[in-house]
Amino acid sequence: MSGIRKPMRWVMIWLLPIIVIGGFLYPLLGYLVVAMVGVMLPLSYFHKRYWCTHLCPRGSLLDLALARLARGRRVPRLFTNRKFRWGVFFAFMALLTVCIVRSGGMLLGVGSVFVTMCLITTAISVILGIQTRRRAWCAICPMGTLQEKIWALSHRRRGRRTESEED
């Protein structure tokens, strides 16, 4: 919880309720999700999951809100399985794609899709966080999985061995 005291995390924590609550009144706020991904993915090329650890609004909220509610149980082993994590990633991307196509590609419709996806994943993260550890969602987060892959590819290109290659 010491990380939550960092000023940037206190700023970022407000993005989640702005998107989830404000997005229902003003769907264009859903594009904040796109902006965050636009920062997160290039950052992961150099710093793996820096976003997750230091800047993620959902992670900050989970740290704060679930500090006393989480049961402190181990995250299910399945969540750390690479195939499962990539399955979650591709299922999430397929659902996101279908929803965007169904929205007709209209600006407000697509914004609403991102708001809804943010709400759904936040609800899942809270349920998982209460049942196990507060950041259990982070083990299967599609964006965290993608960040790790980008970082691993960047290190291969630069001639460094990644943690998964050393195992």
Image (spheres, rainbow, N blue to C red):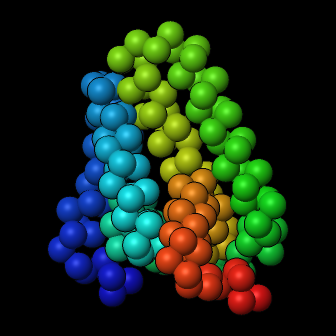
* Residue at 37% in and 64% down: 43
* Residue at 48% in and 27% down: 113
Q: Is residue 127 left or right of residue 76?
A: left
* Residue at 76% in and 66% down: 82
Q: Quadrant of the N terminus?
A: bottom left
Q: Quadrant of the C terminus?
A: bottom right
Q: Is residue 12 left or right of residue 44?
A: left
Front in this rendered view, residue 51 or 3: 51
| Residue 147 percent across, percent down from the top left | 52, 63
Give the answer, above or below, for where 24 lies relative to 109: below
Front in this rendered view, residue 156 or 37: 156
Q: Is residue 17 left or right of residue 125?
A: left
Give the answer, above or below, for where 27 lies relative to 5: above
| Residue 155 percent across, percent down from the top left | 53, 76
Quadrant in the picture for residue 109: top left
**Is any atom of residue 125 visible in this view?**
no
Q: Is residue 156 left or right of residue 108?
A: right
Front in this rendered view, residue 118 or 61: 118
